């Protein structure tokens, strides 16, 4: 294939920085020949800003919780079905609580999560995390958790990166992805991680993007010719793998994704990100193993909730519940090898704010 000097220069620039809809760490993709259908899938959802775990899951009838919290305490659960009540949805816990007789309940906006918990598909862990450091900085706490080194935020790699480095090399075109605009610190120093906001936009950006398909896009074809992948040069191999990944995504007709029958995702940013993860996991040759999702807006210093339990934070908890429930049901075919972990750096406690990760894990 021949191309003009102008096309060559445009191709050089595009090959370095013109990936639209994705950011490619070091432009290195895994070898699809290494893909294994039995690989476990881990999805990590980070609630950034400090989710109040004691409004998500409350010891709602314990005075040690209710008295210090005052108006912020979740209303007491009322089992009478004839009464409209915004109180906690009581759950049956298999282990004894810290205080005998204390009942625990999920926020009333989370009936979907309660259903999964009662069915034994989900676990919740309260007040775990950074006991060695009492920082009240959300940014420091996020760094400690994502790097996996409490008290040390200059660690050069993330905890997921180190996990991947100690396991077999993931195969497929998109084995490690961040469903969003950037790769989190948990994947720091992992060159194969790709940030994907929307699979429909995964491709080469340029003047012809909106008027031509990749097959008829001169820039795309120019770059493809520049990186045949015939030599041992790392840049050549990475360029070829980038082109092959784009072509694999394009072949899958990702603009027409239909979730599993009966599943409808709610219209919020978390649900959209999880839908992208589900779509990627189902694509042939992607071999997804790790996916990260960020969901912000949890720094609720003011106007967290009303006295009756309604308000901003309960509504946001409802978004988590609906999004995770839709994702769970959309991924039925992957339940044997799927784990979802939801965590936050720290939340509000009794009268103080200790640093503690709030973790909700769904192993299916």
Image (spheres, grey):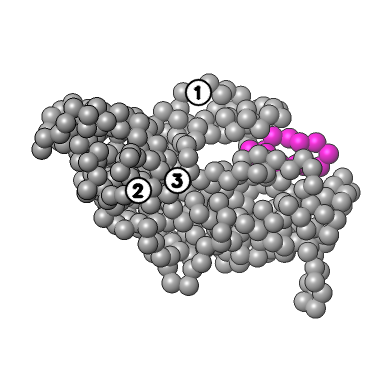
Question: Is 132 located above or below residue 244 in the figure?
Answer: above
Mark 1 Cα-neighbour bin, 10 Å: few <14, some 14–19, many ≥20: some
Separation (CA) of disc 3 from disc 1: 27 Å
Would you say 130 lies left or right of 157 here? right
Q: Secondary structure at mark 2?
A: loop
Tag 2 residue: 210
Query: 240 or 60: which is nearer to us?
Result: 240
Instruction: Place residue 238 in its image quadrant.
Output: top left
Residue drawn at the location 55% of the way across and 51% of the way down: 269
Residue 340 lies in the magenta stretch: no
Instruction: Place residue 281 in its image quadrant.
Output: bottom left
Tag 1 residue: 155
Tag 3 residue: 197
Query: 152 or 22: which is nearer to us?
Result: 22
**The N terminus sits in image quarter:** top left
Q: Earlier in the sequence, mark 2 or mark 3?
A: 3
């Amino acid at each position: 294939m021949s191309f003009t000097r102008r096309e060559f220069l445009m191709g050089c620039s595009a090959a370095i920085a013109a990936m639209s809809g994705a950011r490619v760490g070091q432009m290195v993709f895994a070898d699809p020949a290494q893909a294994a259908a039995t690989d476990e899938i881990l999805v990590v959802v980070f609630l950034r800003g400090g989710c109040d775990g004691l409004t998500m899951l409350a010891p709602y009838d314990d005075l040690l919780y209710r008295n210090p919290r005052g108006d912020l305490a979740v209303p007491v659960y009322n089992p009478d079905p004839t009464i409209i009540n915004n109180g906690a949805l009581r759950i049956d816990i298999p282990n004894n609580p810290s205080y005998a007789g204390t009942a625990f309940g999920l926020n009333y906006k989370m009936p979907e999560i309660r259903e999964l918990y009662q069915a034994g598909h989900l676990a919740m862990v309260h007040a775990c995390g950074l006991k060695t450091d009492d920082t009240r900085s959300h940014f420091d706490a996020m760094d400690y958790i994502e790097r996996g080194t409490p008290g040390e935020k200059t660690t050069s790699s993330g905890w997921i990166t180190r996990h991947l480095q100690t396991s077999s090399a993931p195969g497929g075109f998109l084995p490690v992805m961040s469903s969003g605009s950037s790769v989190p610190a948990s994947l720091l120093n992992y060159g194969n991680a790709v940030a994907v906001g929307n699979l429909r936009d995964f491709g080469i950006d340029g003047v012809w993007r909106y008027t031509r398909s990749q097959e008829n896009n001169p820039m795309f074809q120019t770059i493809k010719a520049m990186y045949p992948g015939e030599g041992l040069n790392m840049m050549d191999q990475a360029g070829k793998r980038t082109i092959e990944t784009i072509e694999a995504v394009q072949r899958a007709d990702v603009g027409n994704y239909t979730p599993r029958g009966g599943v409808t995702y709610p219209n919020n940013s978390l649900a959209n990100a999880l839908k992208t993860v589900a779509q990627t996991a189902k694509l042939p040759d992607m071999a997804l193993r790790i996916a990260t999702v960020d969901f912000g807006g949890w720094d609720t210093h003011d106007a967290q909730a009303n006295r009756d339990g309604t308000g901003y934070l309960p509504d946001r908890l409802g978004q988590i519940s609906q999004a995770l429930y839709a994702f769970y049901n959309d991924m039925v075919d992957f339940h044997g090898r799927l784990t979802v972990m939801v965590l936050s750096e720290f939340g509000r406690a009794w009268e103080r704010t200790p640093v503690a990760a709030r973790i909700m894990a769904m192993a299916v």
